[in-house]
């Protein structure tokens, strides 16, 4: 090796690695930004932009059936909403479905999760049964239970008649139709709650229950002092997801009653669908969707604040 080549090698060593590899030597914060940037861009494209576009459209009078160009009307769509009795009825129906089905699904899901967590010899049939309602499409579940509650050849009325009761015309009465919808939603969504809670149960160490047995604590005391406190994170996560989907309820009431009788079982999501898809009133439909999005965000904020307060 010549003296010149030795000097060139030494100078290259002094300069360090090539410039194109220096980005690999990023700090932890910069590396995190680089790795998260693709996901952030994707979320911006599929979530942030549609939400912003939705809010922008809600300030316009945009009806595809009128043949007129979009016209900026400011808050007119929101003021019309306040005077719309169907909006208030569908919003109340949505809130009532949420208040009934979310606690109901939680209680049923908790019972199912505790059952699936018992030390059976063969646990997979019990756990497989939890997946069936969850995997069933919402619209299909609505069709199945529409047949179950049918006044002439439904399973529910057949059972009632065999027990000596009179059959009920479920979908002609607002109260009975609403009750049928809530029962269907609880059946469909309780398995989702059970799966999340069951995952939380699997993380609780068995040693805690063994120590409680040594101390003489019974099953009920173990449940309230060990199981429930350690299940709170899983329960809160399940409640967040279930509440948001309850506020967006559409498929099951749409397939079971179509919102009837009248609009007594219509939800806010069904009213949005009616305005945007059936009436092609994109401006007013967008304003309704903004309200539903705001409700979902408020509920999520309440849950997250509750978690932070307890921590």
Image (cartoon, helix red, strand yellow):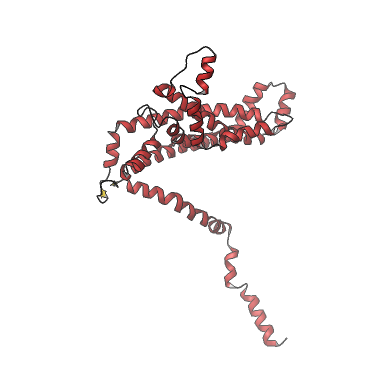
Q: Is residue 189 or residue 181 the one in the foreground?
A: 181
Instruction: Kindly tell me whether residue 27 is visible in this rendering.
Output: yes
Quarter of the image for the C terminus: give it. top right
Q: Is residue 250 or residue 198 the one in the foreground?
A: 250
Q: Position of residue 228 (x, y in %)?
A: 60, 28
307 relative to 221, above or below: below
Q: Position of residue 77 (x, y in %)?
A: 28, 41
280 relative to 261, above or below: below
Q: Position of residue 308 (x, y in %)?
A: 52, 37
131 horizontally vs 303: left or right: right
Q: Is residue 93 or residue 174 the one in the foreground?
A: 174
Q: Furthest-top residue in view?
A: 164
Residue ID at (66%, 35%): 202
Q: Furthest-front residue in view?
A: 153
Residue ID at (52%, 57%): 38
183 horizontally vs 194: left or right: left
What is the tally of numbered marks visible in this picture? 0
Q: Position of residue 277 (x, y in %)?
A: 36, 42
65 horizontally vs 19: left or right: left
Residue ID at (60%, 30%): 229
6 relative to 302, above or below: below
Residue ID at (50%, 28%): 145
Q: Quadrant of residue 205?
A: top right
Quarter of the image for the N terminus: give it. bottom right
Instruction: Kindly tell me whether residue 100 is visible in this rendering.
Output: no
């Amino acid at each position: 090796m010549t003296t010149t080549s030795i000097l060139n090698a030494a100078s290259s060593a002094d300069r360090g690695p090539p410039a194109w590899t220096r980005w690999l030597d990023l700090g932890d914060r910069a590396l995190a930004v680089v790795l998260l940037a693709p996901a952030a861009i994707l979320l911006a494209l599929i979530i942030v932009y549609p939400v912003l576009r939705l809010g922008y459209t809600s300030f316009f009078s945009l009806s595809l059936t009128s043949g007129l160009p979009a016209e900026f009307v400011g808050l007119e769509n929101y003021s019309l909403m306040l005077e719309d009795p169907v909006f208030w009825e569908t919003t109340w129906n949505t809130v009532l479905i949420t208040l009934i089905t979310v606690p109901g699904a939680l209680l049923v899901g908790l019972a199912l999760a505790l059952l699936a967590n018992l030390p059976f010899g063969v646990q997979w049939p019990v756990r497989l049964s939890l997946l069936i309602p969850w995997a069933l499409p919402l619209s299909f579940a609505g069709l199945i239970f529409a047949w179950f509650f049918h006044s002439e050849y439904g399973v529910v009325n057949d059972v009632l008649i065999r027990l000596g009761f009179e059959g009920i015309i479920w979908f002609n009465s607002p109260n009975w139709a609403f009750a049928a919808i809530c029962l269907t939603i609880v059946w469909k969504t309780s398995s989702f709650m059970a799966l999340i809670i069951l995952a939380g149960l699997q993380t609780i160490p068995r040693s805690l229950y063994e120590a409680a047995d040594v101390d003489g604590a019974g099953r009920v005391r173990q449940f309230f002092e060990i199981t429930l406190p350690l299940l709170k994170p899983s329960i809160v996560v399940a409640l967040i997801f279930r509440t948001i989907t309850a506020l967006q309820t559409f498929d099951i009431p749409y397939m079971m009653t179509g919102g009837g009788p009248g609009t007594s079982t219509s939800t806010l999501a069904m009213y949005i669908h009616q305005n945007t898809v059936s009436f092609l009133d994109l401006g007013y439909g967008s304003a309704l969707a903004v309200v539903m999005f705001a409700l979902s965000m408020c509920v999520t904020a309440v849950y997250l604040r509750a978690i932070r307060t307890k921590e």
